[in-house]
Image (cartoon, rainbow, N blue to C red):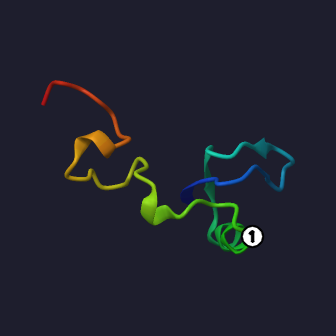
Amino acid sequence: MVHVKLAKAWTDGSGTTHSAGESVDVDAATLADLQEKGIVSDAKNWAGPTGPKPSDPQNWAGPTSSQP
């Protein structure tokens, strides 16, 4: 399974509708289909749960805390 962020709304095979901006887990075949249709966001520009923390913390969408 792969965790992706949707760029557009998508209805999965079981009939569940997922909104744009929502993160979902999909298999490799579904991911390829979603990429072909332009439904998934460009993963290179998404600082999701496994994304690297950029050098400028102002642009990081990860957890926030003032404690180390």
Residue at 12% over, 31% down: 68
Q: Quadrant of residue 44?
A: bottom left
Query: From the viewer's perspective, is 22 left or right of 49?
Result: right
Q: Work out whether 40 lies above or below 17.
A: below
Q: Position of residue 22 (x, y in %)?
A: 62, 43
Tell me which amino acid carries mark 1.
Lys
Residue at 70% over, 61% down: 39
In this orientation, which residue lies closer to the viewer: 55 or 32? 55
Q: Position of residue 38 (x, y in %)?
A: 69, 67
Q: Position of residue 67 (x, y in %)?
A: 15, 25
Q: Work out whether 64 lies above or below 28.
A: above
Residue at 68% over, 46% down: 20
Query: From the viewer's perspective, is 38 left or right of 41?
Result: right
In this orientation, which residue lies closer to the viewer: 14 or 53? 53
Q: Quadrant of the N terminus?
A: bottom right
Residue at 38% over, 53% down: 50
In this orientation, which residue lies closer to the viewer: 58 or 64? 58
Residue at image mark 1: 37
Label 1 environment density (alpha carbons within 10 Å; few <14, some 14–19, many ≥20): few
Query: How many numbered marks, from 0 up?
Result: 1
